[in-house]
Amino acid sequence: MKTIYGILLLSIVLFIPQKDLQAQTLLHNIEMDAGAISNPGADLYVSKLTYNPQWQFGDDKFRVGLNAGGVYRSKEVDFIVGVNAALKVGNLSLLDGNFSLGGLFVRAGFDWTGESEKILSGGLMYQLSHIAVNITYGRDLKFDNNWITTGFAISLSKPNRDPEEN
């Protein structure tokens, strides 16, 4: 299983073209989440590995995207696909905004799995350059399960920068 994840990650990294810093509006992210599911009588552990292309709007204030990947839950591996959105609610910085410590995002999403699960989710994400950490709560609308996960994401895209910084 680790070999499949490694091959997937490597193929995505090698075949995604990078654009100019100022022109980057499509972000390419790989996200790994792990947590628990409130399914009585089954394995409580859940994990996901997804590829998330996102389009950013309004000087990276709002992002809309898709996600596709694999999910492990109830002792089975399955696919997961969905849509997501993120709204930047704040920037953390030092020295009167001259040293950025990243941004805080509120996220929402809707996912489908091969078992016809429909998962409505929301959470918080803190992003610093190419690395992000998140915590997410999801509700499976078909089986009435709760999903609570934490994880991290790696951006394969170059972040937008102020033209005066170059």
Image (spheres, rainbow, N blue to C red):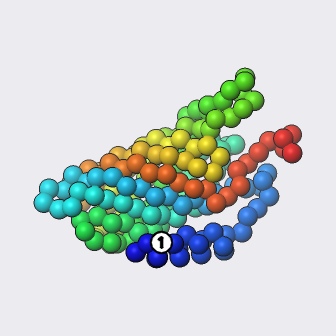
Residue that protrudes farthest toward the front in the picture? 2
Q: Is 96 situated left or right of 45 in this image?
A: right
* Residue at the image point whose x is 53% and y is 54% from the top: 153
* Residue at the image point whose x is 80% and y is 42% from the top: 162
Q: Is 42 situated left or right of 100 in this image?
A: left
Binning the other alpha carbons within 10 Å of mark 1 as few (below 14), some (14 to 19) or many (20 upward) gives some
Q: Is 46 situated left or right of 59 in this image?
A: left
Q: Nearer the viewer, residue 30 or 60?
A: 30
Residue 152 locus on image (x, y percent): 49, 51
Q: Nearer the viewer, residue 52 or 165?
A: 165
Q: Amino acid at mark 1?
A: Tyr
Q: Judge whether 19 appears above or below 14 on screen.
A: above
Q: Judge whether 53 appears above or below 139 on screen.
A: below
Residue that protrudes farthest toward the left in the picture? 41
Q: How many marks?
A: 1
Whether residue 145 is visible, yes or no, is no
Q: Quadrant of the N terminus?
A: bottom left
The residue pinned by badge 1 equals 5
Q: Nearer the viewer, residue 6 or 8?
A: 6
* Residue at the image point whose x is 86% and y is 40% from the top: 164
Residue 60 locus on image (x, y percent): 65, 44
Q: Judge whether 61 appears above or below 24 on screen.
A: above
Q: Tell me where residue 99 sits by quadrant.
A: top right
* Residue at the image point whose x is 57% and y is 59% from the top: 29
Residue 23 locus on image (x, y percent): 77, 55
The kind of secondary structure element at disc 1 is helix
Q: Tell me where residue 128 sits by quadrant.
A: top right
Q: Quadrant of the C terminus?
A: top right
Residue 110 locus on image (x, y percent): 40, 56
